[in-house]
Image (spheres, rainbow, N blue to C red):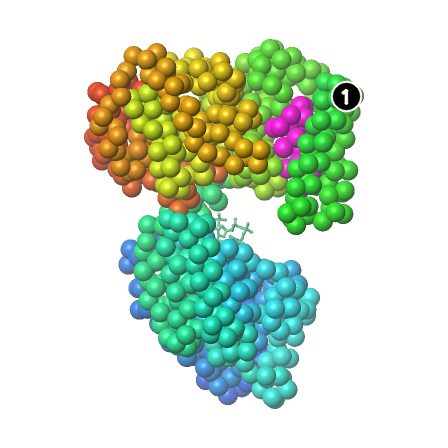
Amino acid sequence: MGTGRTTLEVGADGVAVITIVNPPVNSLSIDVLYSLNDNYEQALRRNDVKAIVVTGAGGKFSGGFDISSFSAILGEKVGQPSAGFISIDIITNTWEGARKPSVAAIDGLALGGGLEVAMACHARVSTSSAQLGLPELQLGVIPGFGGTQRLPRLVGLTKALEMILMSRPIKGEEAHSLGLVDAIVSSDQLVKTAKLWALDIVEFRKPWVKSLFKTDKLEPLGEAREILNFARAQAKKQAANLQHPLVCIDVIEEGVISGPLAGLQKEANSFQTVVASETCKSLVHVFFAQRSTSKVPGITNLGLKPREITKVAILGGGLMGSGIATALVLSNFPVILKEVNADFLRAGINRIRANLQSRVKKGKMTEENFEKSLSLVKGALDYESFTDVDLVIEAVIEDVSLKQQVFADLEKYCPSHCILASNTSTIDLNLIGKSTNSMDRIVGAHFFSPAHIMPLLEIVRTHKTSPQVVLDLLDIGTKIHKTPIVVGNCTGFAVNRMFFPYTQSALLFVDHGLDPYKIDRACTKFGMPMGPFRMVDLVGFGVAVAIGVQYLQSFPDRCYKSMLMPLMLKDKRSGEASGKGFYKYDERRKISPDPEIKKYIEKSRSAAGVTPDPELMKLSDKDIIEMVFLPVVNEACRVLDEGVVVKASDLDIGSIMGMGFPPYRGGIIFWADSLGAAYIHKRLDEWTKKYGDFFKPCSCLAQLAASGGQLSTAAGQVKARL
Ligand SMILES: C[C@H](O)CC(=O)SCCNC(=O)CCNC(=O)[C@H](O)C(C)(C)COP(=O)(O)OP(=O)(O)OC[C@H]1O[C@@H](n2cnc3c(N)ncnc32)[C@H](O)[C@@H]1OP(=O)(O)O
């Protein structure tokens, strides 16, 4: 903060150009807003100024209010403007109400507060590629500079609600067709056109429009109410735990019913409330945490440059291999898909085709792009075409000796600069590369299934992986629109490892008498996309049991050996794919609870030698959530303590993007810190005494509990194993 400013330049034509300068995205910090207002006032005072153009430096109008000052405002580190001071006194009364017209010249992006400033101008000129939107809801706040009032008046209620509730920006062309911008021009003509437009307004050749008082785009009252009620119902359905979308709809409604000034006032008051909410704090944390995953000490601060990757090969066309190939071709990387025989190869390419086709069906891809993407895939049955590949991603089955053979072959056939990546989810990379001399270029590229959809990529490095290789993968990850986190080498790496107690804890409590469906319901109410039992149904019991064995071997002191899934497997009940798991599935994959599972639970219970605990029947949802997630927090603490990740916020991002932990709770560590290490330790301790060592708090958690420390700072205190 404190570096942003605006500049004022008055031309001989009598137009004052005010430019927002606050790299990298010209965010509107409090300083910038005050400087913008000073320059506006100066332009309004000066006799040689007839009209004003507002624009942004470096090809970007503005990325909106400075998100990092949300917390500064709340912490009163900067003077908190009173509700409505910026949106009513400054933007509406001083700028929109001025006696001189202003035109916004928009390039690059006009988001949030940026678009709100532009909407208060009397016209907008934009480039066709500029992004315009009000994405505030993704940060847990509502538009706070008049956006809830002006956007519906410029584009109509239905479109405005869609843009605001989905936090979805639109491009300049669409904005033009909707009436949000008045003209589209190229970047080099932008300011010139905006100046002429402003002078035309002065000369009454173009209309002088105050967006706040436009009514022609607003739907009639009855229709508007219906649209708002529909939006309310949708918002509740999509995110039952979130209040701010409903607050936003109420604010928009106030403007439609009682007029824009009443709407502005309500917006200003409501903004003050939502910016102080836990949801906003969590989502702002996630915004910055996500951006910080790509800043890795010892990798990204060495002055290295990512190398160009032009050709990628993938070994194995199964679910993972085909998903990874899909992700790559979607970002225009040519891919060689290698399989062991023609049938498997055909099946792999067909999977890629189906993945792409599903995008076409959903309207996310044109037929032309479909053909183009598919043409980037070339099949191979041997290593002949591997002589010029820059990156190989191995995605064969989880078999150590097979992987060892594959990596020995890769070393033989690929050029010496080629990165050799494995998509293993559990196997030690040192073991995989044991018989090679290439450990410096062996790295894990752990995608989450389905790989073309899930946004997370774990980049796993060993002690020997070179920083250049990690940097190259970070670059590729970003290019294929994944959020990469760099992690150390251990069973399950960071994300799967910290989440293995999620299902195990649920299985333990079912043995002790808790109803599995009640556990799943509590988890989905908490915000998980699915509970642990629905999740293992989806993964399949065969895979889930095999993974369980890996954890048992690596962490025998803290694994719960439930017999429930093996017992069901014996009866060929293996999850969704077999039509039956913890749930029953009909032909259309609709699920329903299955009373038959009681008999398996009883068998599992007697194998474990436990009797149902009547106390467990009375548990609240909050208790259930703590019982399944606090063991996850305990393992996350170990992951931090061992330095498997370099910062705790990487686990927040891993939990959200890899496991579906609700982002509005800030991620697993952020959520745990809201409970406090002492409380978590106490609860785990209670359950250890009652149910055994599965719950035993780790030493790192015990230390934090004793010292009153926070989990979010734990990673910095240890020697990273990375
Ligand atoms: C009162 C008002 O109604 C309230 C508001 O305006 S709230 C803010 C609304 N605006 C937003 O939500 C936009 C948030 N930003 C974004 O979506 C994206 O950053 C973007 C589309 C602008 C640019 O994306 P991209 O080019 O991929 O760059 P990205 O890495 O995200 O951002 C570049 C840098 O700008 C920072 N940044 C982006 N927008 C910012 C903002 N509004 N405030 C402060 N910093 C911001 C990022 O933290 C990042 O910093 P870093 O380099 O130190 O990590």
- Which x, y percent locates residue 192? 65, 74
Is residue 319 located in the magenta-colored stretch of the structure? yes
Residue 226 visible in the shown view = yes
Residue position marked by numbered label 1 in the rendering:
342
Among the 4 quarters of the image, the one containing residue 386 = top right
> In the image shown, does 644 or 12 lie closer to the viewer?
644
Name the residue at 36% across, 26% down.
506
Please tell me which residue is depicted at 45% across the width and 50% down the height of the picture.
238
Disc 1 within 8 angstroms of ligand 1 (CB): no
Vertical order, 406 against 98 (above or below):
above
Residue 453, compared with residue 275, is above or below; it is above
Q: Is residue 224 depicted above or below 325 in this figure? A: below
Magenta highlight on residue 70: no
Name which residue type carries label 1. Answer: Ala
Magenta segment boundaries in residue numbering:
310-331
Q: Is residue 115 visible?
A: no
Quarter of the image that includes the N terminus: bottom left
